[in-house]
Image (spheres, rainbow, N blue to C red):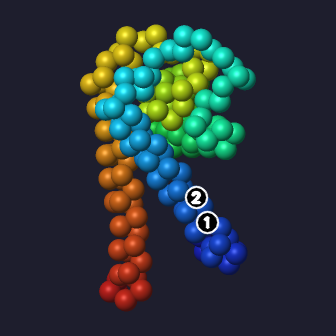
Amino acid sequence: ELRHRASPWQRNLGYPLAMLGLLALTGISVLIVCFHVLELLLDDAAMPRGMEDASLGQVSFSIFGSFGAALQVVLIFYLMVSSVVGFYSSPLFTRLLPERQDTPLTKIIGNCVSLLVLSSALPVFSRTLGITRFDLLGDFGRFNWLGNFYIVFLYNMGFAGLTTLCLVKRVSWAVQAELIRAFGEDR
């Protein structure tokens, strides 16, 4: 219903641009994770351990300088939003969604706890995937399991594989549905 009420500009320009942006951010994050997997295989320094000497402001945390740092911020924000959307769209937690002016206190507390857990896991998540090396001054690199090559490698491979699978599934189903609709086979 919202799509039918949208303006032609929104339908013909806004939605495709938003979709292309989401595809680009997903593709970039998968590419960064794939490069991180290669780094893990070739160099032990790619492991997400804590920084010994935090030289903030002296050395860039990205290979690409300011552009890379801005890209890291955008990707971390994208991962945060996609984690929250994925969490609330999973069948187990759809009942936790708040309702407008009819949300009991237990549901509000459950939402606060869920968002706190998701936001606390985000720095470790982005560091384990190799999206950023910045420690957020929380010294998250001291977790023992971040030094285990197999756990970090399998985590990265799982993220890259499952994200690629979801991307291909979503895009191919959308293209398939449009082709069926275009050829009139839906009737």
Task: Find residue 65 and report its image quarter.
Answer: top right
Q: Is residue 18 left or right of residue 39?
A: right
Q: Quadrant of the N terminus?
A: bottom right
Q: Nearer the viewer, residue 49 or 183?
A: 49
Q: Quadrant of the C terminus?
A: bottom left
Residue count near mark 2 (Cα–Cα under 10 Å), binned few <14, some 14–19, many ≥20? few
Q: Is residue 78 left or right of residue 143?
A: right
Cβ atoms at labels 1 and 2 below 8 Å apart: yes
Location of residue 130 in the rendering, given as x and y in whole percent from the top left corner: 46, 32
87 up-or-down from 1: above or below: above
Mark linked to residue 71: none
Task: Find residue 156 and report its image quarter.
Answer: top left
Location of residue 43 in the rendering, given as x and y in whole percent from the top left corner: 37, 27
Q: Is residue 118 visible?
A: no
C-alpha separation, residue under disc 1 versus residue under disc 2: 6 Å
Q: Is residue 82 left or right of residue 172?
A: right
Location of residue 68 in the rendering, given as x and y in whole percent from the top left corner: 62, 41
- Residue pushed farthest right? 57
Task: Find residue 71 and report its image quarter.
Answer: top right
Q: Nearer the viewer, residue 92 or 185?
A: 185
Q: Nearer the viewer, residue 85 or 17?
A: 17
Which residue lies under the disc numbered 1?
Answer: 17
Residue displayed at 38% across by 47% down: 163
24 up-or-down from 50: above or below: below
Three-letter code, disc 2:
Gly
Three-letter code, disc 1:
Leu
Which residue lies under the disc numbered 2?
Answer: 21
Dot 2 falls on a residue whose secondary structure is helix
